[in-house]
Image: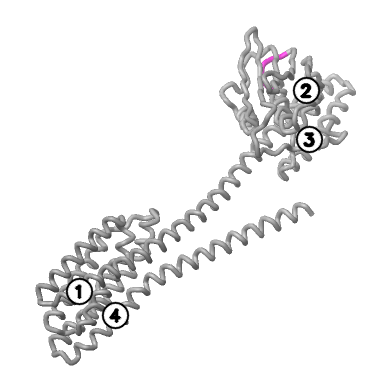
Amino acid sequence: MKELTEVIGHVRGWRRGWTERTKLQRIDLYTRVTLCALPWIFLVSWGLLPLGATLDRGPAAIALGGAFFAVNAVQCLLSNRNVSLSFAHYRGSEPFPMRRLRLPAALLAVLTGLLVALAAVGGVKDEGLALLVLDLPVAFTIPYVLLVPVRTYLLHCAAFAVALVALLAAVGVPGGLLFGAALSLFVVFLLVLTSTRPSAWSMSVMWQAEDARDMQARLAVAEERLRFGRDMHDVLGRNLAVIALKSELAVELAQRGNAAAVDQMVEVQRIARASQQEVRDVVRGYREADLPTELLGAKGVLEAAGISCTVEGADGPAGIGAPPAIQAALGWVVREAATNVLRHGDPRHCVIRLTTAAGAVVLEVENDGAGAAPEVGGGSGLAGLRERLAALGGSLEAGAAGDGLFRVTATVPLTAPRGLPSPAPRSVSPEER
């Protein structure tokens, strides 16, 4: 029932994340469609209505008005093509090829020349000129404002406004209309700036938040994989070593005809079954080492292998008096250290010592006969232990202690960092003991 609840929770989390991403994609699509539709709205309103006056102003005015509308429509198409790339450039996900601005810039110059020519031949009314000025730079500036810094955008807009007003003045446009044209340019440049960049910024922030959630999910998966691998190593390492040891002993006893071989194989069978349960606990994430149980287990396993083992301080404040999280972490240290004693060197005696010093619990596992230092370079076992202890603010040292001794020292402060859970010791069945 608990596994089914966990599966349902994962499915709901996936559906919730998928729904949120779908909503974000819809918002992104709505923003892009709005920015693509904006030039066309200007084209069929402020860009088209004033051109109706050219129909009764002669062939030249009609030709200039038609050319202005056609070039403006092409400019809108190019603007729509560049919006998505401009968004990607603004977000930093893909650079915008600046060569794509050459044609829009050339069309803007053509549109400017056509507008000045219309003003020179009197092809538009006075208020129509102001509307055409409003429509003139919209299609070009919508993607352009996302490609350059705001200061650069404003400087270029100011230069364009000065050039356009100067050209209109050169063809005899009155001062009042020049002021209206300058005001129209100011309004449209400010409109594009305040509508496009905030929209792009909002979408960028939302996509960054979505990417952060994806990264968090990937990190959680990676952390769970590391936990699983570390726990599998810690759980099975000692048991497999004991199984191998007892199997060898059973073979020797069987060759001698000693009935005790059966007892050894029964013990192997018991350990194998206990290992199966421990693997299930690791898979489910429930496995926690119990310090008293691990101390008894280490002593029993080492003595069964012919290694005398002495445990000191197990009943003191550094043992059963330590917080559950510290006991669990030290239990893993005892298990891994006992496994290394079995695997490496030719020890005859091992001492496991628990003490307190300077507000910390200190666990020492020392054995003689260490011909080769076990995992001194940072093997997977001790590396996993260092990760466990680091989560509690502790440390682990392992190395030769002189006179053929090898010592593993784990230090964990009694005051663990805040926010860390304190798992309760897992209950151990009589069979596992």
Amino acid carrying mark 3 in the image:
Pro
Name the front one of labels 3 and 1: 1
Segment tinted magenta in the rendering: 343-347
Query: Where does label 1 land, which residue?
Result: 111
Q: Position of residue 286 (x, y in %)?
A: 74, 42
Cα distance in 3D space between marks 1 and 2: 87 Å
Q: Element type at marker 3?
A: loop
Residue drawn at x 67%, y 26% as measured from the top left? 412
Using the image as rendered, state which of residue 280 and residue 264 is in the foreground: 280
The numbered mark at residue 46 is 4
Query: Where does label 2 land, which residue?
Result: 317
Q: Is residue 304 left or right of residue 284?
A: right
Q: Report the predominant secondary structure element of the magenta stretch.
A: loop
Cα distance in 3D space between marks 3 and 1: 79 Å
Using the image as rendered, state which of residue 315 and residue 232 is in the foreground: 315
Q: Element type at marker 2?
A: loop
Name the front one of labels 4 and 1: 4
Q: Earlier in the sequence, mark 4 or mark 2?
A: 4
The answer to whether residue 372 of the structure is visible from this angle is: yes
Cα distance in 3D space between marks 4 and 1: 14 Å
Query: Where does label 3 land, which residue?
Result: 425
Residue drawn at x 66%, y 23% as measured from the top left? 411
Cα distance in 3D space between marks 4 and 2: 84 Å
Q: Is residue 89 left or right of residue 346?
A: left
Q: Earlier in the sequence, mark 2 or mark 3?
A: 2
Q: Could you say which quadrant of the image residue 146 lies in? A: bottom left
